[in-house]
Image (tube, rainbow, N blue to C red):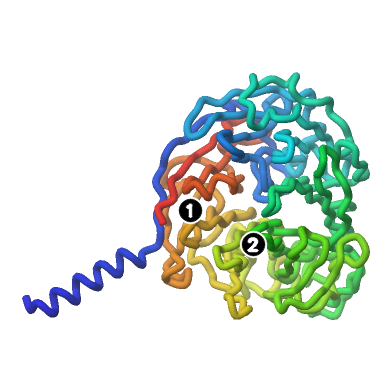
Amino acid sequence: MNILVLFSLLTSFLLGICNAAPSVSLVSNTVLDSSSIFFVSYDGVVNVNSFQLSGVLTYGNYQYAAWYTSNRNAVLARRQLPSGSWSTLQLPHQLSTNDSHNVIAVGVSPSDGRIHVALDCHSTQMFYTRSEAGFATSGASWAASRFEGITTTLGNLNIGSTVTYPQFVLTSDNVLQFVYRSGVSGNGATQLAEYNGGSWSNVGSWASASGTYTSTNGKTSTARNLYIHGFTYRNGRLHVTGTWREQNSAVMCNGGGLTNHDTTYFYSDDKGRNWRNSAGSSIGTSGSNPVNVNTGGIIVDSLNADHGLMNQESQDVDSAGQIHAIISYIPGRFTQCVTNYQADRTAYARAFHVFRSTNGAFTKMEIPWAINAVGRSQIVMDGQDNVYVILPYVRIVTASKSSGWTDWTMAYDGVANGLNAFGEVTVDRARVSSGLLSIMYQVKSSGTTPSALRLIDFRLNG
């Protein structure tokens, strides 16, 4: 063979290896609870939901997980990384109702080493507790006695009696924040609180229900809420993507759909006090002038309320400070009018990768696998800005930065590997920076028959 031809073939082969989509390697699959609570509501199960930013959480040398047992008890577990055995403690609280949105969220405040737990709310009062100081780092015996009593306030802060989607988030300078919705679906405000000096303070509403939305069918809605895909800090900047849900169902072409519409993006450089759109224009201030549906320059992907657009999927931010989000809906090639979002999403929905380039332009790319589920997907990025998307049933698809995130590959198929996962999963986002992906999932069951809750770990091979 001609030496030039051989060199060309070898170069092409090596470039193919260098530009290949990243892979994942299975490390372990551990049973957290062989018999955890199981029921389906709002198309989900209470122990694993995409919108749980911290249902499983790494902090320091420990990983934490929280769930409800088959007898409804709230359990908090801990293991020492990388592969220690799990210890569990039972908090003095039981799940109040069979509502899959009454999730448990876990956070740690670095300023005093306390573990914070918020749970069991869906447009109702929230329950909250926190540990003794230093407990997150001391390695002291794992016991419920180290936690304060359960309250219906956020410690010292009264956040009202209609709370949903509690989420703990760490800022770039390690301040613990708390994100939640007040009000109800279709008529609610997204709120922010902050923990400093051992107590909580209110930052205020940063996305409100106000304004008027007019749909493509000419119908209007005057109330809504913003569902967020995340609340992500990178290099001091806070990034938020989301979708609006309207109160008036008349904005849809058919009552069997979802009133969700449009994908939005905006950011804050002062920990959620003031907000700017993608162009850098000032658009709102938390507490006094929150963002609303008529705020200019925040829609980055326009879509009407007729396509079963899902709320609360996920997002991440790359090393250049650019947002990446996963959204999913039923493309127009299947139908221009969703009439049954559960059936139509299961049959036709596709996930899309939406990301911002450094020039400010947004790109949307369809991921070439059907979701085959009603529910949501998760996105994480490794240290080289490669993308890993966890589709329902623990199917992991990947794309490399070097390809411009176009070389989508199925890196792990939880269906083919017999995991029998229910659908949506919860991801330990704090652990990804160490090159490991921890995914909490629940085994499928029927009715209210308990099933196993598991944590599966993968090494990211970017």
Element on which disc 2 rests: helix
Q: Which residue is mark 2?
A: 344
Nearer the observer: mark 1 or 2; the answer is: 1
Element on which disc 1 rests: strand
Horizontal side of 206 relative to 297 (left or right) equals: right
Residue at left offset 70%, top offset 75%: 278
Provide residue 167's location: percent of width, then percent of height.
Answer: 74, 47
- Compared to residue 409, the image places residue 167 above or below, namely above
- Compared to residue 239, the image places residue 101 above or below, namely above
Q: Nearer the viewer, residue 259 or 240?
A: 240
Q: Nearer the viewer, residue 131 or 29?
A: 131
Q: Nearer the viewer, residue 230 or 454?
A: 230
Q: Which residue is mark 1?
A: 396
Q: Earlier in the sequence, mark 1 or mark 2?
A: 2
Residue at left offset 83%, top offset 49%: 193
- Compared to residue 173, the image places residue 402 above or below, namely below
Q: Residue furthest left?
A: 1
Provide residue 456's location: percent of width, then percent of height.
Answer: 50, 39
* Quadrant placement of the C terminus: bottom left
Residues packed near mark 2 inside 10 Å, few (<14), some (14 to 19) or many (20 plus)? many
- The quarter of the displayed image where residue 157 is located: top right
Horizontal side of 301 relative to 194 (left or right) equals: left
Question: Type of residue at label 1?
Answer: Ile
Q: Is residue 431 visible?
A: yes
